[in-house]
Image (tube, grey):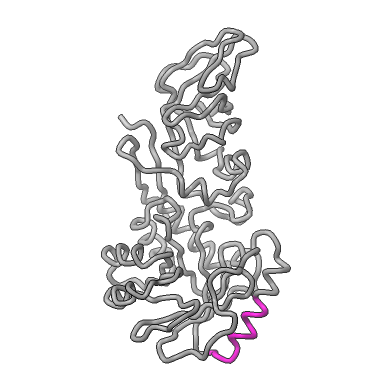
């Protein structure tokens, strides 16, 4: 039996795609499926995104794109990160599109020129004259989720730089901008986190009518009574002040349930219980209101328990937690093809 089970609801992903398309009001949706679709499974999620209306798939590396091409022979695939010179031939053979941020501009492959308007990473300081292989112009917004005023300055700079090239596809918006900054939408928006039903703002995704795609369940494998003064876990970080029932879950930081999630909550048969002590590599302790039977279901992420809650406890972002949930032979993954 698996120690835990992940469920990926592809129906929810398709519905999120359509929610984003409504927000985009005519601009194309380009689905960001890098990092194994943010830990959700790239091949199934890419197909679902296209079924939901996405026109392009975006990844970070040529290696990701080539693997995706083997599964999706006809999809448009854009590599957003830099392609090294020795990868260009492989990208050309795989019919990919590349983003160019500086240096020599390849020939014989569709290209997107990237303007750095304030991210301060990849990108030209000034757009070069687009050659015959250039099909798009793009930029990358740094603060659409946190500082819309700065994001608007980036958008305006991009608009001014791109206005001389109306025949090229302009794309700047990420999930946060697509949802909250209408002026960012241009011809297409590259949406990742929102596609998976996670909030780019760290809020409840339902605020933007998004539905989480991933849920994660485990079970209590042992209940035990700690007497006052007894502890559980490495370092004796939790010492019972009085007789206390604890439950042991067969997941830990090797599975992606991180050490800094001590203090978060899980749902035990629908009831909230706190994670206590030190999260181990493959075990986690929770405080129970009473003894429960081995096999009692535990929701780690799912209805009533958002990944955004865990992110606040860990002082990180939901992106990082989703990408860190590790697939292994000891955990089952269930794909649900839910309704649209």
Q: Where's residue 16, x and y in %?
A: 50, 58
What span is colored magenta in the figure? Answer: 155-166
Task: Answer whether residue 158 is magenta in the image.
Answer: yes
Q: Is residue 189 left or right of residue 184?
A: left
Q: Is residue 138 above or below residue 316?
A: below
Q: Is residue 77 above or below residue 325?
A: below
Q: Is residue 93 left or right of residue 99?
A: left
Q: Which residue shows up at 54% across the image and 31% down it?
A: 266
Q: Main secondary structure of the magenta part?
A: helix
Q: Is residue 290 above or below residue 320?
A: above
Q: Which residue shows up at 49% across the image and 79% down it?
A: 102
Q: Is residue 257 left or right of residue 76?
A: right
Q: Is residue 234 left or right of residue 33?
A: right
Q: Nearer the viewer, residue 197 or 21?
A: 197
Q: Which residue shows up at 42% across the image and 37% down it?
A: 254
Q: Where's residue 133, x and y in %?
A: 40, 87
Q: Where's residue 169, x and y in %?
A: 50, 82
């Amino acid at each position: 039996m698996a120690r835990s089970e992940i469920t990926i609801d592809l129906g929810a992903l398709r519905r999120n795609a359509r929610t984003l398309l409504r927000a985009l009001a005519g601009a194309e949706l380009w689905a960001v499926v890098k990092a194994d679709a943010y830990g959700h499974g790239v091949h199934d999620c890419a197909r679902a995104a296209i079924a939901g209306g996405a026109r392009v798939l975006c990844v970070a590396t040529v290696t990701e794109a080539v693997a995706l091409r083997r599964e999706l022979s006809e999809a448009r695939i854009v590599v957003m990160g830099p392609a090294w010179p020795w990868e260009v031939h492989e990208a050309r053979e795989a019919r990919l599109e590349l983003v160019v941020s500086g240096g020599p501009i390849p020939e014989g492959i569709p290209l997107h020129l990237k303007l750095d308007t304030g991210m301060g990473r990849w990108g030209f300081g000034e757009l070069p004259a687009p050659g015959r292989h250039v099909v798009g112009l793009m930029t990358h917004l740094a603060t659409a989720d946190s500082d819309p005023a700065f994001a608007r300055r980036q958008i305006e700079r991009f608009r001014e730089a791109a206005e001389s090239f109306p025949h090229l596809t302009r794309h700047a918006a990420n999930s946060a901008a697509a949802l909250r900054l209408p002026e960012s939408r241009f011809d297409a928006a590259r949406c990742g986190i929102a596609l998976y039903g996670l909030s780019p703002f760290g809020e409840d995704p339902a605020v933007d009518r998004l539905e989480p795609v991933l849920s994660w369940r485990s079970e209590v494998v042992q209940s035990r009574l700690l007497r006052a003064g007894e502890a559980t876990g490495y370092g004796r970080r939790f010492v019972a002040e009085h007789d206390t029932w604890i439950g042991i879950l067969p997941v830990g930081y090797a599975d992606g349930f991180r050490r800094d999630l001590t203090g978060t909550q899980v749902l035990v048969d629908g009831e909230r219980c706190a994670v206590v002590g030190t999260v181990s590599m493959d075990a986690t302790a929770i405080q129970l209101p009473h003894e429960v039977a081995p096999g009692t279901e535990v929701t780690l992420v799912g209805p009533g328990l958002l990944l955004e809650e865990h992110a606040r406890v860990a002082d990180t972002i939901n992106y990082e937690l989703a990408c860190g949930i590790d697939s292994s032979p000891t955990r089952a993954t269930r794909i649900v093809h839910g309704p649209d």
